[in-house]
Image: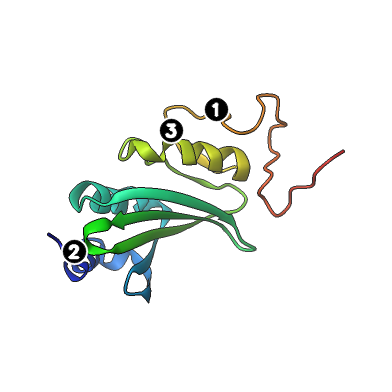
Amino acid sequence: MMTRESILARIRETLGGRILAWQEKSPRRVYLEVAPRDVPEAARLVFGALGARFQIASGVDTPTAIEILYHWAFDAAGLVVTIRTRLDRRQPEIESLASICKGTEWIEREMWELLGIRFRNHPDLRHLLLSDDWPEGQYPLRRDYVKRG
C-alpha cells in the first residue's frame, strides 16, 4: 500500500518544475497547481499510475481567471490531492480528461455549459443541465452573467 508520503514524493518527483504551487492545507488535503497544458499528465499520474479515485471537479470564476480544481482521493492513505489550474477568462480552454478518466465526462459538460470552458476532444459536449435552446455565450455561473426577464 502506498503511504501519504510515498504518494506525495512520487507526484513531486514526476511533475517536478511543472508544479507552480504546492499547499498542504491539512494532513489529508494537498493542493497543487499546474499550467493547463500539464493537467492531462498530472491526471495520468494520479489516476493511472498511482490509482487515485476521481471524486469531482470544481469550476470557479474568479476575478482574474477561470479555475478548475480536480479532486482525487487516495482512500487507503486517507488523502485527497487537488490539481488546480487557471484558464484565461476571455477564452477558457483545456484538454478534456475524459479519455484518461471517463468519470470526468459529465462534470466537464456541466463546466462547459455553466462557465463556458471549452474542453478540447471531449467526446460529447452537449447540454446536460440547461435547455438546448439556451442562448449561446450566456454562462449562468460567470461573474458577468446578467439574468434577463
Q: Position of residue 7 (x, y in %)?
A: 20, 64
Q: Nearer the viewer, residue 2 or 62?
A: 2
Query: Relative to residue 85, is residue 96 depicted above or below?
Result: above
Q: Earlier in the sequence, mark 1 or mark 2?
A: 2
> Which colouring convention does the figure follow?
rainbow
Horizontally, residue 136 falls left or right of residue 108, namely right
Say which amino acid is labelled 2. Answer: Arg
> What's the CA distance linking mark 1 and mark 3?
10 Å
Asked whether the beta carbons under mark 1 and mark 2 sit within 8 Å of each other, the answer is no
Residue at left offset 22%, top offset 63%: 77
Residue type (three-letter) at the residue carrying disc 1:
Arg
Question: Label 2 belongs to which residue?
Answer: 10
At 18% from the left edge and 64% from the top edge, which residue is drawn?
Answer: 10
Identify residue type, mark 3.
Answer: His
Q: Which residue is mark 1?
A: 126
| Pick the front one: 114 or 16 | 114
